Image (cartoon, rainbow, N blue to C red):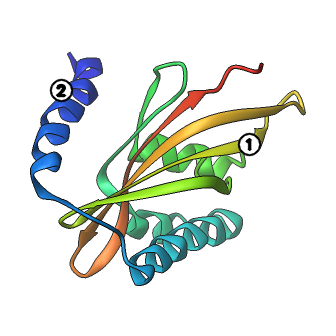
C-alpha cells in the first residue's frame, strides 16, 4: 500500500497542478531555490541535521531510480553518512514550473558512483513555500541509459 502512495500523489497533484499553473518562475524564485540547494550542501558538509530538518519538509519523500522510497529520516541519515546522493549534486538543463506555492524543477545530474563511474540521471525536485520559506518536499531520480 505505501509503495502506491507516490503514484496516487503524482496523479492527484498532477491533475490539480495543471489547473493552477503559472506561466513562469521569477528570477527571485529561482535564486531562492538555488539558495535552498546551497543550504543543503553546506548542511551536509557540516553534518548539521538540525539545518537539514529545517530545509526538508516533515513528509519529504525521495524515490530512487530503482523504485526504493526514502522518507525524511532515512534521507537525512543517508546524507549525513557521506554517501553520494542527487541531493548534493549540481543539476544542469534545469526547467522550472510553478503552481501556487509549489515549484517543480526538472533537470539532469551527473554523479560519480561508488565504483568511480560517472552516471547520468534525470531528476525531479519539488519545493513548497511554507511560512514564507521554500522547503524541499520531494525528489525522484531516473537513470538515463548510456548511448
Q: Nearer the N terminus, badge 2 or badge 1? A: 2
Q: Which residue is drawn at 69% across and 20% down?
A: 145
Tag 1, which secondary structure?
A: strand
- Where residue 134 appears, x then y in whole percent? 35, 72
How many angstroms separate mark 2 from mark 1 (CA)?
29 Å
- Where residue 90 appears, x then y in whole percent? 67, 57
Q: Residue at x 75, y 41 (%)?
A: 111
Q: Residue at x 24, y 19 (%)?
A: 4
- Disc 2 packing (10 Å; few <14; some 14–19; many ≥20): few
Asked if residue 63 lies left or right of residue 137, the reply is: right
Q: Can residue 61 be seen in this view?
A: yes
User: Which residue is disc 1 drawn over?
Assistant: 110
Give the farthest residue toward the top: 1
- Where residue 74 appears, x then y in whole percent? 47, 40
| Above/below status of 114 relative to 125 | above
Tag 2, which secondary structure?
A: helix
User: Which residue is disc 2 drawn over?
Assistant: 8
Q: Residue at x 64, y 66 (%)?
A: 41
Which quadrant holds the N terminus? top left
Amino acid at each position: 500500500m505505501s509503495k502506491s502512495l507516490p503514484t496516487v500523489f503524482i496523479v492527484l497533484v498532477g491533475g490539480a497542478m495543471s489547473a493552477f499553473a503559472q506561466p513562469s518562475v521569477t528570477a527571485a524564485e529561482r535564486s531562492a531555490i538555488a539558495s535552498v540547494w546551497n543550504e543543503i550542501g553546506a548542511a551536509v558538509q557540516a553534518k548539521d541535521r538540525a539545518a537539514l530538518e529545517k530545509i526538508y519538509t516533515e513528509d519529504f519523500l525521495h524515490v530512487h531510480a530503482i523504485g526504493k522510497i526514502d522518507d525524511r529520516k532515512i534521507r537525512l541519515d543517508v546524507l549525513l553518512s557521506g554517501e553520494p546522493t542527487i541531493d548534493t549534486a549540481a543539476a544542469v538543463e534545469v526547467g522550472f514550473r510553478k503552481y501556487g506555492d509549489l515549484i517543480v524543477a526538472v533537470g539532469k545530474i551527473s554523479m560519480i558512483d561508488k565504483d568511480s563511474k560517472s552516471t547520468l540521471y534525470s531528476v525531479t525536485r519539488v519545493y513548497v513555500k511554507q511560512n514564507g520559506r521554500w522547503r524541499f518536499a520531494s525528489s525522484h531520480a531516473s537513470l538515463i541509459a548510456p548511448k
